[in-house]
Image (tube, grey):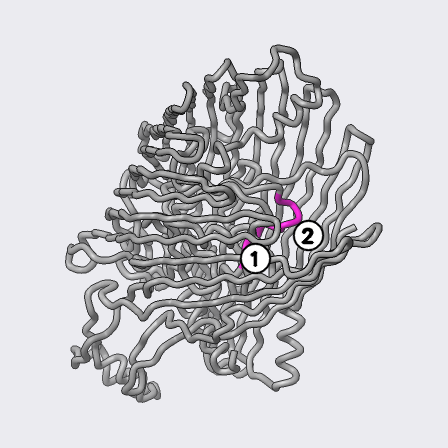
Amino acid sequence: MTVHVFSRILRFTIKHKRTFSLIFLCCLSSFYVEAQNDRPEQPAPDTARIVTLDSVVITGSRLRRNNTYQYTLNEIKPLVTVLGEQDVLRYIGTLPGVSQGMEGGLGFFVRGSNSGNNRFTLDDVPVYGNTHLFGLFSVFSPDIVENVNFFSGKLPASSGDFLSSLTQISSKNPDTESYHGNFSISPFLVGANLTGDLVKNKLSFQVAGRYSLLSQEIRLLESMLEMEGDIVPEMADLYVKLHYRPHANHTLNASGYYSNDYFKFENSNFSSPNFAENWGNKIFRLSWNWSLSDSLQLNTMAYYNRFFTVQKQQMFNNNVLDKEFRMQTALNEQALHSTLNYQMGNRKVAVGLQSMRREIYPASRKIYTGNRDTESNNVQSVNPPSSAVIITAFGDYEYKYKSVTASAGIRESYYRIHDYHSFDNNIHLALSIELSKKNGLELSYDRFSQFYHVLEGLPVGWNLDLMIPSDKQFQPEKAQQFYVGGFQTIQQFFLSLGAYYKNMKNLASYKNPANIFSIQDNWRDEVINGKGTSYGLEFRGERSGEDWNASLSYSLSKTDRLFKEINNGEKFPFKFDRRHILNFTGQIRTRQRQNGKQYFSLSSSFSSGHNITVPIAMYMGVEPPFWSWQLSNDLSIKEQENAMYRQLMSDVNGYSLPYYLRIDVGYGFLHTWKYFTSECTIGVFNVLNRQNPYLLFYDEGQWKQLSIFPLIPSIKWSLEF
């Protein structure tokens, strides 16, 4: 059904030019405090201990960026997006080793893995539905983000249950002394944020929310152009956080997050089916941080997480609803874990336990025939949910001796679902050698496990893909990755170059992505297991300065897949196996005054075209059963041709599309008054108006190309107080 919805959206655009329930568990965990050999041996003040607690998720020196990247909101400003919104995830698409899916979207394929193998967390809570509006921008409002850590290797053992990359998003702590906030508006989105103290230096809060204006704008456009049908896109998210510090050694946080997307397309004349999509997140989190001493900290967290996606299709007969088909996938997750951080000289040690109960509703369906309010005409078919328990123990150890830093981590997990259980271990090893103060070498090894599968019907990175649990038939996905690289700093420049090799197994895929949307008794018949390999070279260069900064990333890689029941059991290229990927971003300050500044931004993206399967010949097929009876039902000529003729397809992903090229430009105005700061940004996405191909298809006797986005201007204004 998603395939039909997606194609209908594109056609419309072109036509108009455009564990056990919650296991109680106390544990020890994550020692990660920075070694400071020259620090005097004296107790630190209470406030210093609190600051250390709040920033304990660190990936190492900022200059060493092989495998790990830490960035803030200032570094994402040069990036122009389709809707003109600042997006904390957009920066990931510019990093080496990352291949992007649909143009303008947030489908990331890191080092040959699927988009569903990435993990995104908000304050260590997984966010499974991480995009809005079919993947055009993320669900994370910039107003709540303090910093972002992105890992493609050298991963901490305290995080797991993914096969590719980890993106840790840390939220801001609300202001405990004063009130401040901001308001922003663009043609597509309006947002607001407010933070302040409820009890001075004790209790503070933050509230941030966004709402899309697209629904109202499309209604206005429909009335002006007298368009047929009705399109309703809706989007909203809301974040609330309470920060309580009853004592210098204790900090309590409670936060809630909600996001919802809804899309509906209705035909005014009932000539074709109506479609509706709905997906969203609900998250509630409690945490307690206790500083036992200057070097010992205990962090405990519990959370509830719900993600869902629903797809609906309605068919009509003589303008009367004849059949309604619904399909849903959902995930409910509850978790509890504690962490203990301890530092001893130049050693960092981490041990911990985590407990999780996860319930997945895989491809649940409801089918209504006739009037669905009449029980006699109502048929339901629902796949039952699967409940799993994951109990994990982990440990991290790091030792630094002069110019050598060695780290090792292990994560042992017990996984149980129905009559299947397994013990999985993840291992993380890393070695960093500083050859001098300006250059060095890094080596790392990572072994991953993921206890659920994401079935990507259209691999573009949106949130409408189906999730299924790992079990005896579809065992946990596994991967191991090797990396070796070097880094060097030259004044304001940082350079890194490295190579990786990765192999994956137990990957889940559809035999044919379209079949899952047909009416069937068991989705398991359409899903198979396979494996994959990926290897490549990665380069990154950065320049940081007050007047201008820039970055350049290049990836040379190759990724394959192997499934016994796909492509006659022969190895085939991954859809987004782009051989060459080159990304550039830059920003220059064009004007500076005491109360403001102006800046110009430029970003470009070049890559080899992705791979698709295309028809290479046509032939006459066998006449379908009861064909003579079907002819009497007024089938169109096109429908008769589709029934009688067959297409001979190329090898899977056997054709590479032409190269992809896009250039974006932006200009910003920042002005500061006594109590307010105003910022206006103007951007042009795809300033060359290049029609980059996303799909080729043969129709009406000729080859046609489908492109997603033309030149798109944007503007956004924000006011901070």
**Stretch in magenta:** 137-145
The residue labelled by disc 1 is 587
Q: Nearer the viewer, mark 2 or mark 1?
A: 1
Label 1 sits on what residue type? Gln
Counting from the top left corner in percent of width and height, residue 471 is at 32, 39
Label 2 sits on what residue type? Gly
> Mark 2 packing: few (<14 Cα in 10 Å), some, or many (20+)?
many
Residue at x 50% of width, y 77% of height: 13
Q: Is residue 143 left or right of residue 642?
A: right
**Quadrant assignment, res 164:** top left
Residue at x 47% of width, y 56% of height: 106
Q: Is residue 373 above or below residue 114?
A: below
Label 2 secondary element: strand
Label 1 secondary element: strand
In this rendered view, identify the residue nearer to me: 663 or 378: 663
The residue labelled by disc 2 is 209
Q: Is residue 150 above or below residue 264?
A: above
In this rendered view, identify the residue nearer to me: 184 or 71: 71
Counting from the top left corner in percent of width and height, residue 406 is at 38, 24
